[in-house]
Image (spheres, rainbow, N blue to C red):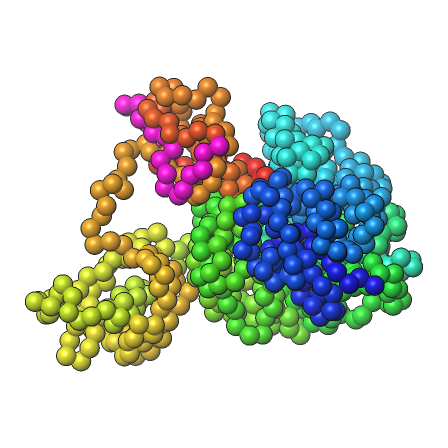
């Protein structure tokens, strides 16, 4: 039996596996990069081994170092989690060759299905060898790996060669395999998958369907089980195809077979030979612990002949440190507080006070709700997210709440084009008009009455806040009865440094106020306190290109130098942050008068990268384009 398990991964999935191991009495071993030295997964394991370096290529993608760590610490088994080396047949073989138990399918099954081209051949599907205008749009896809990396939608034949080259480079960097292929791109289909679990005795379970259609950058955002609105015949076909794929490669352990459903037909996409991020919804519906079942299968135990019966509906939302309104730009900084109400499941790799860095995926947590019906599960999850305390960098929390309450989603009519159609509306700023006042009153309550206003106590006090990208000014007064709003429409019922109760139009509204430096969270609204007097040093000359996030300058456009002529929208340089490359383009047509960025340079948000002086009389749009994400990196 397994007694000591190394998890060859980090963050949320490592913590989730450790949780099951504790329940089973299995000792745990973590590995961590230098950037993750204080990460939660390294703290909660029974022991941890350092992998020198910060980047995935130096650490979590070094199978040799991980096997060495397992042997040195006395582990007898290795679980790969998902991502990184989880679908690497060479790593699986190295684990087995070292005499360790591999928690996953045989290396031969990984090889057969890890290459999407070979997987399609096994299922009798041929990729497009030559693409013509009639085939467009097509999807360029990495043959190995997943997570949206190495994928490009091509709508113009003239762009095909460029996108193929970019996808090859990205795939080679992320997975060590530059093979790519093309396939028809089905607009606005539904992404539906089937969870399989197989033992070494010939039993294969198909644990229902999941719908993962709400995606950004080909990465899933909201997942649910079972997939809503499928006919009984189509569900049966999906389960049979999934079992057929597993049996074709003598599969064992947990895996997922993915399909695109369009026009009432199922189109095979790939088989992921690992546990999926969205596995908790299947666990909730079927009442199983898939990690525990993986461990039992690896120990040689047989599954019952039939899987447990499904009950109810489960929905999972992925909480990311990113700004959907700014092209999903990843965010970094301190996560001061992360808490959700009782009644939902929270899987996370962070605790209060942890730092969100630049080296890894920006997913903070997964929040899962289970209920007897889909409508109840949707309502429960949306309510829990709305009430969650997420204090720190900008997240996609508000987007998730609005997505779950959107009429297309509640009716089960969503597809993979959901965010393409609705993102602008889903990210439109929503402002609580009284949140800045609550912040100002709570701050004033926590300060002495004998401040700079003491000689003119009748004068209103003024504070300014940034909320949803706009500046808001509030006024209040100190009176004999206490603090009061400097307007007649709002009555201050209660004030202290953490709680404010305001009454407007006869309705009392309580506000919980939490402050971290100049960042204030008022219920679910984030505010930034602005200084009384602007800092002159913060002013920038027109045409300044500023870093939109912390990251590393990975490359400059060919021949870029001061004095070069550039056109509006022309890519000038690329930043890498949190597994993504972000293209920084010229804001106007003109001359590059300053270049402060160099390859390999680490930059902070707001750092001056370059300056473009606009050509006089040129009628190009003046606004600086948002940074455009061009590819993902490992």
Q: Give the range drawn in magenta.
A: 600-622
The residue located at (37%, 27%) in the rendering is 595
Q: Position of residue 253 (x, y in %)?
A: 81, 56
Q: Is the magenta stretch mostly helix, strand or loop?
A: loop
The residue located at (48%, 46%) in the rendering is 329
Q: Position of residue 453 (x, y in %)?
A: 13, 65
Q: Is residue 596 left or right of residue 53?
A: left
Q: In this view, does 133 lie to the left or right of 577?
A: right
Find the residue positioned furthest to the front.
72
The picture quadrant where one finds residue 346 is bottom right
Residue nearest the observer in this picture, 245 or 289: 289
Which image quadrant: the C terminus?
A: top right
Asked if the magenta segment contains residue 346, the reply would be no
The residue located at (25%, 57%) in the rendering is 464
Q: Is residue 603 visible?
A: yes
Q: Can residue 235 be seen in this view?
A: no
Residue nearest the observer in this picture, 179 or 508: 179
């Amino acid at each position: 039996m397994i007694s000591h398990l190394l998890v060859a991964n980090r963050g949320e999935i490592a913590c989730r596996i450790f949780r099951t191991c504790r329940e089973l009495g299995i000792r745990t071993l973590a590995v961590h990069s230098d950037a993750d030295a204080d990460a939660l997964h390294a703290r909660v394991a029974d022991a941890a081994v350092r992998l020198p370096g910060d980047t995935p290529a130096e650490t979590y993608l070094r199978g040799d170092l991980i096997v060495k760590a397992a042997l040195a610490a006395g582990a007898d088994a290795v679980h790969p989690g998902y991502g990184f080396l989880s679908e690497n047949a060479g790593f699986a073989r190295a684990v087995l060759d070292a005499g360790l138990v591999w928690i996953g399918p045989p290396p031969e099954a990984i090889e057969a299905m890890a290459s999407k081209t070979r997987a399609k051949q096994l299922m009798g599907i041929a990729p497009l060898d030559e693409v013509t205008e009639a085939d467009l749009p097509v999807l360029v896809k990495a043959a190995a790996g997943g997570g949206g990396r190495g994928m490009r939608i091509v709508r113009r034949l003239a762009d095909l060669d460029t996108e193929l080259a970019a996808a090859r480079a990205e795939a080679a960097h992320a997975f060590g395999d530059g093979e790519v292929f093309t396939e028809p791109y089905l607009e606005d289909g539904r992404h539906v998958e089937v969870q399989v679990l197989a033992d070494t005795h010939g039993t294969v379970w198909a644990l229902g369907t999941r719908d993962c259609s709400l995606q950004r950058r080909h990465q899933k955002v909201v997942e649910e089980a079972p997939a809503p609105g499928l006919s009984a015949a189509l569900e049966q076909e999906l389960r049979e195809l999934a079992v057929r794929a597993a049996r074709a490669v003598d599969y064992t352990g947990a895996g997922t077979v993915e399909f695109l459903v369009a026009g009432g037909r199922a189109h095979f996409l790939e088989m992921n030979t690992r546990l999926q991020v969205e596995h908790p919804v299947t666990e909730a519906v079927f009442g199983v612990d898939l990690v525990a079942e993986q461990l039992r299968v690896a120990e040689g135990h047989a599954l019952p002949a039939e899987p447990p019966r499904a009950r109810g509906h489960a929905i999972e939302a992925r909480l990311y440190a990113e700004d959907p309104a700014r092209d999903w730009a990843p965010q970094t900084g301190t996560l001061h507080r992360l808490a959700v109400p009782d009644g939902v499941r929270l899987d996370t790799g962070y605790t209060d006070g942890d730092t969100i860095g630049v080296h890894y995926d920006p997913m903070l947590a997964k929040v899962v709700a289970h209920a007897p019906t889909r409508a109840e599960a949707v309502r429960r999850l949306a309510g829990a997210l709305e009430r969650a305390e997420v204090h720190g960098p900008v997240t996609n929390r508000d987007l998730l709440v609005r997505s779950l309450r959107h009429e297309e989603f509640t009716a089960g009519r969503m597809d993979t084009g959901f965010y393409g159609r609705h993102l602008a509306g889903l990210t439109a700023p929503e402002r609580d008009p009284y949140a800045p006042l609550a912040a100002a009153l709570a701050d004033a309550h926590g300060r002495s009455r004998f401040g700079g206003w003491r000689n003119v106590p009748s004068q209103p006090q003024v504070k300014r806040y940034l909320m949803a990208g706009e500046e808001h000014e509030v006024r209040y007064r100190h009176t004999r009865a206490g603090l009061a709003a400097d307007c007649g429409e709002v009555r201050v019922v209660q004030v202290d440094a953490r709680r404010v109760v305001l009454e407007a139009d006869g309705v009392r509204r309580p506000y919980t106020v939490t402050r971290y430096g100049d960042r204030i969270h008022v219920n679910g609204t984030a505010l930034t306190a602005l200084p009384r007097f602007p800092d002159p040093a913060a002013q920038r000359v027109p045409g300044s290109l500023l870093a939109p996030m912390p990251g590393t300058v990975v490359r400059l456009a060919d021949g870029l130098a001061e004095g070069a002529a550039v056109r509006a929208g022309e890519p000038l340089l690329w930043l890498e942050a949190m597994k993504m490359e972000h293209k920084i383009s010229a804001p106007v047509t003109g001359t590059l008068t300053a270049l402060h960025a160099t390859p390999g340079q680490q930059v902070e948000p707001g750092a001056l990268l370059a300056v473009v002086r606009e050509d006089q009389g040129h009628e190009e749009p003046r606004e600086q384009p948002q940074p455009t994400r061009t590819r993902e990196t490992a």
